[in-house]
Structures are given as structure tokens and as C-alpha cells.
């Protein structure tokens, strides 16, 4: 289980929604068809769980299975790296959304 604040849920939902298509495209290039399809199924399951969270609560408990946690443990650090490159090139600063992703990443490291 992952306990997230509302702003962390919003950041994760926003970034995962934005990155769905590029992630799918990247998985198709680097993996065989079955593996890419299975990984995208996991991605979509996580996205669906996040979308079903009640917005009125301040703290949210996200029930994730082992495969979903493993996926996020791979996806979030990669994505943070990509965002940091972009911020360093364009703005030389970090955003609140990036900081939220870093907090979620740290939580995932102790979730297993």
C-alpha cells in the first residue's frame, strides 16, 4: 500500500496520463509484443486505480500489487531523470510536480 497526499496523487496522475502514449511506443520498440502488452496492462491498471481515488480526502491509500510496484520503481526514476534533464536545459530549477514524483519514488523504495 502506498499512502499519498492529494498533490502527489495529482502529480502521478498527470504525468502518467501524459506519458502513456510515449511509454507504449517505447515499450514496443524495446520489447517483444507480448512483454510490451503486459507492461502496458500494468501501466493501465495503475492509472485506473489512481483515477478512482476520492479527491475529497487529504491522504490516499493506493493498493498496488507486486507487479505494479515494480513497474513504478522502474518508471518513476527513469521519468524523473528525463524531467531533470529537461529542467536543467530549460529552467535550471525543479518544479513542485517533480518534487512530488521524487517523494513517491522514495516511498516506493521502502514499499517492497
Image: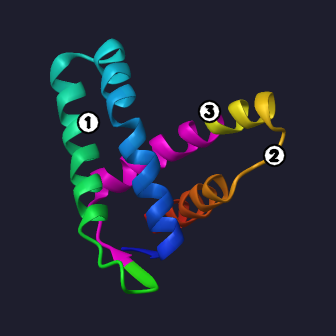
Q: Nearer the viewer, residue 62 or 111?
A: 62
In the image, residue 69 lies at what x, y percent? Answer: 37, 56
Q: How many angstroms separate mark 3 from mark 2 (CA)? A: 14 Å
- Report the mark closest to the observer, 1 or 3: 3
Magenta segment, which residues?
A: 61-81
Horizontal relation, residue 2 to residue 76: left or right: left
Q: Residue at x 34, y 36 (%)?
A: 20
Residue 15 screen position, x and y as percent? 46, 47
**Mark 3 surroundings: few (<14), some (14-19) or many (≥20) residues within 10 A:** few
Secondary structure of the residue carrying tag 3 is: helix
Q: Nearer the viewer, mark 1 or mark 2?
A: 2
96 lies left or right of 25:
right
Query: Residue 45 at x, y = what percent?
Result: 21, 52
Q: Disc 2 marks which residue? A: 93
Dot placed on the residue nearer the N-terminal end, 1 or 3: 1
Secondary structure, mark 1, is helix
Is 42 included in the stretch rendered in magenta? Answer: no
Mark nearest the camera among 3 and 2 is 2
Compared with residue 47, is residue 29 higher up or lower down, i.e. above or below? above
Reply yes or no: does residue 71 show up in magenta.
yes
Residue denoted by label 1: 39
The residue to which callout 3 is attached is 82
Magenta segment main secondary structure: helix
Relative vertical location of residue 34 with respect to residue 58 in this rendering, above or below: above
**Could you tell whether 79 is left or right of 83 in the image?**
left
Amino acid at each position: 500500500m502506498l499512502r499519498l497526499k492529494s498533490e502527489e496523487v495529482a502529480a502521478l496522475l498527470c504525468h502518467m496520463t501524459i506519458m502513456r502514449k510515449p511509454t507504449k511506443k517505447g515499450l514496443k520498440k524495446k520489447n517483444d509484443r507480448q512483454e510490451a502488452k503486459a507492461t502496458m496492462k500494468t501501466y493501465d491498471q495503475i492509472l485506473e486505480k489512481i483515477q478512482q481515488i476520492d479527491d475529497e480526502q487529504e491522504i490516499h491509500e493506493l493498493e498496488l500489487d507486486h507487479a505494479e510496484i515494480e513497474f513504478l520503481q522502474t518508471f518513476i526514476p527513469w521519468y524523473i531523470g528525463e524531467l531533470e534533464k529537461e529542467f536543467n536545459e530549460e529552467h535550471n530549477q525543479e518544479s513542485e510536480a517533480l518534487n512530488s514524483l521524487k517523494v513517491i519514488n522514495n516511498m516506493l523504495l521502502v514499499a517492497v
